[in-house]
Amino acid sequence: MKQILDCTGMLCPEPVVHTKNALETLATGDTVLVIVDNGECKHNVERFAKNRDCTVKIQSVGDTFRLQITKGDEEKVAAPFTPEDYACELPTLELVYVIPSDTLGHGDEALGRILMQAFIKTIGEVSPLPQKILLYNSGVRLATGDSNLIEPLQELANKGVEILSCGTCLDFYNQKKELRVGDMTNMYNIVEAMAQATRTVNPC
């Protein structure tokens, strides 16, 4: 048996309450498809279901998340709510900055380099910090050779920001041996980081 529970437009903890009510009407092994439209609700419904010994499969469809929840232990599902069930916690923000150029914006290149310097130096002053900064194409020049952004990028790295430069791009610009801050990576890891990010920022 499978139920569909549309919780779009609801705020936490309402989807959790509806999910529990739906699960209590099902037999062990039956499923309910819970549809939510924000990351907070997705996170909290998933946490609740797993805490109640249910299995969860999540699919992103357009602007919604679809959680297919298979009922597990009957007693755990039927147990009264706890404060943890009602807690509305946001998942950790995975913020990634994507920088494919050593200039910022389109137009005069000299001005673009000045703007990029200001941009990199400002990242550390704004909250939240990104988890990763991805550099590719001419963006890798920011972390190589005698770039005047080595020091501010190193300061970001010291704060826990992962600086990753495309290896193919470093090779193309003959800068592989000139990498001064961060690590070299490949396109697979760059795409994976972008796909898994909660939010990406591309200033270029």
Image: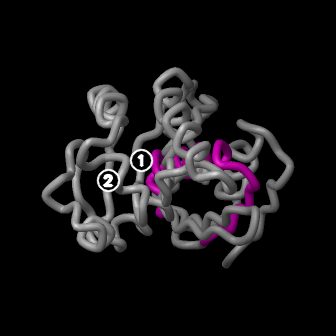
Please give the range of residues in magenta.
Answer: 31-55
Q: Decide if residue 39 is on the left or right side of residue 176.
A: right
Number of residue marks: 2
Which tag, 2 or 1, sits closer to the chain's start? 1
Is 202 in front, or is 58? 202
Q: Position of residue 8 (x, y in %)?
A: 82, 55
Is 97 in front, or is 40? 97
Q: Decide if residue 76 is on the left or right side of residue 201.
A: left
Question: Which residue reaches farthest left?
Answer: 177
Q: Decide if residue 6 is on the left or right side of residue 127.
A: right
Question: For residue 53: magenta?
Answer: yes
Q: Are marks 2 and 1 in contact (CB under 8 Å)?
A: yes
Q: Is residue 98 visible?
A: yes
Question: For residue 20: magenta?
Answer: no
Cα separation, mark 2 vs mark 1, equals 6 Å
Point 56% across, 24% down: residue? 126
Point 72% across, 42% down: residue? 17
Are there few (<14), some (14-19), or many (20+) residues within 10 Å of tag 2?
A: many
Relative to 16, does residue 29 appear above or below in the rendering?
below
Quadrant of the image containing the C terminus: bottom right
Residue identifier under label 2: 164
- What is the three-letter code of the residue carrying label 1? Ile
Residue identifier under label 1: 133
- What is the three-letter code of the residue carrying label 2? Leu
